[in-house]
Amino acid sequence: METTAAFEGLECTATGERFDPATSHHPDGGVLDPVYDYSALEVDPAEMGTPAGYADLLPFPRDRLVSLGEGTTPLVEAPGLAQELDVGRVLIKDEGGNPTGTFKDRGLALSVTAAREAGADRVGLSSTGNSAQSAAAYAARAGLDVQAFLPSRSAFANKAMVNVHGGDMRVVEGRLTDARDSFRDALADHGPDSDEPWYSVEPFDSPYRHEGAKPVLFETLAALDFEPPAAVLYPFEGGAGLYGLYKAARECRELGLLAKLPSLYACQSEGCAPVAEAFEAGRGDTEPWEVPDTVCGGLEIPDPRGGDLVLEALRKTGGGAVAVDDDDILESAVAVNSREGVEAGVSAGAAPAAAWALADDFGPEDTLVLVNTTAGGKDADLLRSHLMGQGY
Ligand SMILES: *Cc1c(COP(=O)(O)O)cnc(C)c1O
């Protein structure tokens, strides 16, 4: 396996135990995190917004990456929202510009690269929809097979595109937890020593899903000349995105680029808010949400694997967690589309909805960054039916 010079291997987030760079998954089901020798690195802050600029902070050399041109997404000024929120600036990091329309492409590019480097033939995952679509695209790119498990409620476009990319799909009756249980059972039959081994690319199974999210923050900070924004608001599902951003912020500080970590906020729907609940209760771990029910299919994980890691990130950065109701999420997503022209999808509306909920905490000097995790066009039906429900 070819790796970058400073990449030293993988570390268990719970015990600190180190594993060889070629280790694909934690042997006991823990979370592995890629580690680097930062003292050996020199980065040019002016280049940190480009793939060449942060190449040494990813595990695989650029010429080995399975890529569809993900990343380098726009950071769009949103003056109308800034005025309404009465803050200095609002910037939207528009991840809808990624190859399959969501930030998931960044993590799947790395995870599928790792799978190919490890000699895998077939990658597998369960997903609320967007990551399955992305996995199918990157597997097609890499010449690998993909086996996706989706709950029946997943969006039609996600299911259709898994097929169109040539993926194999099992649609499981029920919700994400049902699809995930089916995937776990199947994965147990397709272990490393079986005739047909599967390589899991689920977040936190693979060390590279959260690792792939880091450039969202590198690009954002580079565009701001490493002046940290007051807040970065991120729609939360499983935690890979936010944990990746937290790691990127710590790396920038370690490399002397950043004096202070930006405050990170997890934005959830009130219909499934285990992180916001734990944050408010002052707990370090999440408890499973009993009856998850939100229109944001992409945010509905009742027992997020990265919950504990993200709670640490929120506290260490002076951020927080916010739960907003589905109507506010839809309304906010539509507002971003109609006032700023940026195509925000439904789940992505959790970030501006949280910004409204928190507006009193920020002032006219503050810059807020909203991460638009998905393109509005993926949710055109839901957004439009919300409008029609309002009498438009
Ligand atoms: C997956 C997803 C998220 C949340 O990402 P996590 O890394 O799982 O927390 C947010 N928005 C959309 C649209 C997503 O698909």
Image (tube, rainbow, N blue to C red):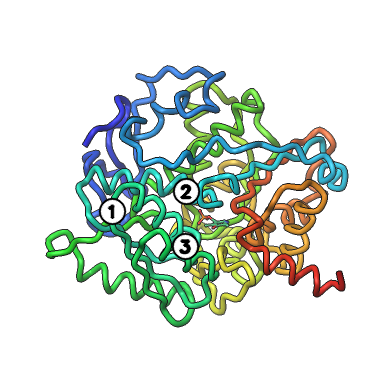
> Which numbered circle lies on residue 205?
none
Mark 3 or mark 1: whose residue is earlier in sequence: 1
Q: Amino acid at mark 1?
A: Leu
Quadrant of the displayed image that contains ligand 1: bottom right
Q: CA distance from mark 2 to mark 3?
A: 14 Å
Q: Position of residue 221 (x, y in %)?
A: 60, 30
Residue 287 point in image, percent of width and height: 50, 69
Question: Label 1, on which residue?
Answer: 144
Q: Circle 3 sits on which residue?
A: 161
Give the residue at x 82% y 46%.
Answer: 81
Q: Earlier in the sequence, mark 1 or mark 2?
A: 2
Find the distance from the CA under tag 3 to the CA under tag 1: 16 Å
Give the farthest residue toward the bottom: 173
Please report whichever mark, 2 or 3, sits nearer to the chain's N-terminal start.
2
**Apparent side of residue 354 relative to residue 219 in the rendered image (left or right):** right
Residue at left 87%, top 47%?
Answer: 84
Mark 3 is surrounded, within 10 Å at the Cα level, by few (under 14), some (14 to 19) or many (20 or more) other residues, namely: some
Residue 105, labelled with which disc?
Answer: 2
Mark 1 near mark 2, Cβ–Cβ under 8 Å?
no
Hey, which quadrant is residue 78 in on the image?
Answer: top right
